[in-house]
Image (cartoon, helix red, strand yellow):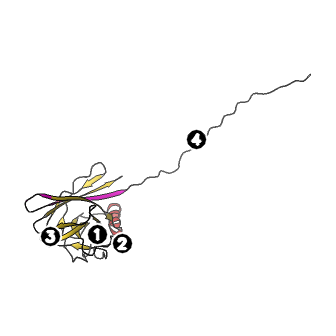
C-alpha cells in the first residue's frame, strides 16, 4: 500500500517603494508677433518669430530672479536686418553678433521701450511695441535687450541681449511710413 501526503501552502509577497527625490523642470519659450501697416493704416503683412534666447540672456534671467536684490527690469526692442544675415548663435551678445546686423531705420535714436502685462497662467506678454519706419529696407526679425540707445548695425553697445529671431515667413520689405507693431510673449511649462 502506498500513501501520499501533501501540504498546502500559501505565500504572498508585497513591496512598496517610494522615490527619494522629486524631478522637476521648466521650459521657457518665447515668440514675437509682428504686424506691418502702411502709411494709410492698412495691414500689409503679419508674421511670427520663434526666438533664440541667447546664453547671456538666460544667465541674466537666472541672476536677476535668484540672486537679485533690487533692480529695474527695463526692456527694449529692436529689429534685425536681412542684410548679410547668416545665423543667430547662442553665444551672441548685444556688442558682438557676427551672423546678423541690427536694422536701425526707424524714428528716434533709441530702441523702443517695452511695457509688460501681468503674468498669468505661466505666461507674460508685452504691450504692443511700435516701430515707425523712416527708410526702405528689409527686416528679418526682432530682438529684445536691456540697452535703450541704438548702437551701430554690427555693435549694439553694452548691455544684455536677451533674445533674437527671424520671421517664420522669411524677410519682409518695409518702406518709409510703414509701422511695425510687435508683441513678445514668454511662457513656462
Label 3 Cα neighbours within 10 Å, binned few <14 / some 14-19 / many ≥20: many
Label 1 Cα neighbours within 10 Å, binned few <14 / some 14-19 / many ≥20: many
Q: Residue 107's image quarter? A: bottom left
**Which residue is located at x 11 percent, y 69 percent?**
176
Residue farthest along the left direction in this orientation: 40
**Which residue is located at x 29 percent, y 52 percent?**
123
For discs 3 and 2, the disc positioned in front in the rendered view: 3
Query: Looking at the image, which is closer to me, 4 or 80?
Result: 80
Between discs 4 and 1, the one toward the N terminus? 4
Number of numbered discs overlaid on the protein picture:
4
Between discs 1 and 2, the one toward the N terminus? 2
For discs 3 and 1, the disc positioned in front in the rendered view: 3
- Where is residue 62 shown, x and y percent of the image? 35, 63
What range of the chain is rendered magenta?
A: 19-43
Label 2 Cα neighbours within 10 Å, binned few <14 / some 14-19 / many ≥20: few
Reading the image, the residue beneath label 4 is 16
Q: Can residue 33 be seen in this view?
A: no
For discs 3 and 4, the disc positioned in front in the rendered view: 3
Q: Of the numbered discs in the image, which one, if any, rests on residue 106?
A: 3
Amino acid at each position: 500500500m502506498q500513501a501520499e501526503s501533501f501540504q498546502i501552502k500559501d505565500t504572498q509577497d508585497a513591496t512598496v517603494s517610494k522615490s527619494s527625490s522629486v524631478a522637476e523642470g521648466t521650459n521657457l519659450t518665447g515668440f514675437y508677433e509682428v504686424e506691418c501697416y502702411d502709411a494709410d493704416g492698412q495691414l500689409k503683412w503679419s508674421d511670427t518669430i520663434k526666438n533664440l534666447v541667447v546664453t547671456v540672456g538666460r544667465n541674466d534671467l537666472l541672476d536677476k530672479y535668484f540672486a537679485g536684490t533690487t533692480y529695474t527690469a527695463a526692456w527694449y526692442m529692436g529689429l534685425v536686418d536681412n542684410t548679410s544675415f547668416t545665423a543667430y548663435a547662442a553665444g551672441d551678445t548685444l556688442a558682438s553678433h557676427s551672423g546678423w546686423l541690427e536694422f536701425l531705420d526707424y524714428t528716434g535714436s533709441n530702441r523702443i521701450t517695452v511695457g509688460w502685462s501681468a503674468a498669468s497662467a505661466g505666461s507674460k506678454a508685452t504691450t504692443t511695441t511700435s516701430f515707425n519706419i523712416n527708410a526702405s529696407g528689409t527686416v528679418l526679425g526682432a530682438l529684445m535687450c536691456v540697452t535703450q540707445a541704438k548702437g551701430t548695425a554690427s555693435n549694439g553697445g553694452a548691455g544684455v541681449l536677451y533674445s533674437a529671431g527671424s520671421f517664420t515667413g522669411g524677410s519682409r520689405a518695409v518702406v518709409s511710413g510703414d509701422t511695425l507693431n510687435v508683441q513678445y510673449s514668454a511662457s513656462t511649462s
